[in-house]
Amino acid sequence: MRWDDTDIGKEWAKTYHQKYYLKNKEKLLKQQKDRIDSDPDFKARKNYMDRKRDADAKKIIYDVLGGPKCIHCGYDKDIRALQLDHINGGGSKDRKSNRSTSKIVRRYKADLSQLKLIYQVLCANCNFIKKYENNET
Ligand SMILES: [Zn+2]
């Protein structure tokens, strides 16, 4: 095993990168800005990659939850109309702390089956009706 794959190594690397970032924050932000300014496609590419990463993460989650299909009405025609619903509500609070789907996957990576206790797949219609009936925000 490589040293930086061990827990101590990971912790050390994390602290090192945090310190490096804080020390060189302005330089790094300027580098990033220069890169974006010099490359007109950068934003489009980044958006594309962000969306792809989220789509991949969604696929992983749907697989765990029994497939891309609304558990309420069975809708499965278009994955874009399916949504990840919090079984017990609290979606907006969670979205604030956890903005992207890929972060959810990372958070539960060790035990993806836990997702089954928290999320369910609903189509947009069923999700909206559920929210309305339960007064969820
Ligand atoms: Zn439905």
Image (cartoon, helix red, strand yellow):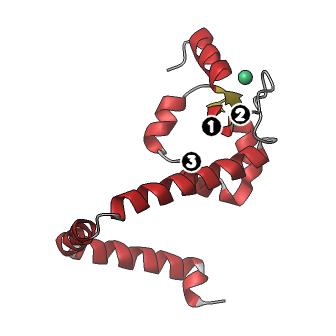
Residue found at the far top of this picture: 133
Determine which quarter of the picture holds residue 126.
top right
Q: What residue type is labelled 1?
A: Arg
Q: Which amino acid does label 3 sit on?
A: Thr
Q: Mark 2 points at which residue?
A: 121
Q: Residue at x 26, y 72 (%)?
A: 35
SS at mark 1 in the image: helix
State whether residue 74 is above or below residue 2: above
SS at mark 3 in the image: helix
How far apart are labels 2 and 1 at the CA level?
Answer: 12 Å
Q: Which residue is drawn at 37% across and 79% down?
A: 16
How far apart are labels 3 and 1 at the CA level?
Answer: 14 Å
How far apart are labels 3 and 2 at the CA level?
Answer: 13 Å
What x and y, as percent, mark residue 9? Answer: 52, 82
Please indicate whether residue 48 sits to the left or right of residue 75 in the image. Answer: left
What x and y, as percent, mark residue 74? Answer: 81, 26
Mark 3 or 1, nearer chain start: 1
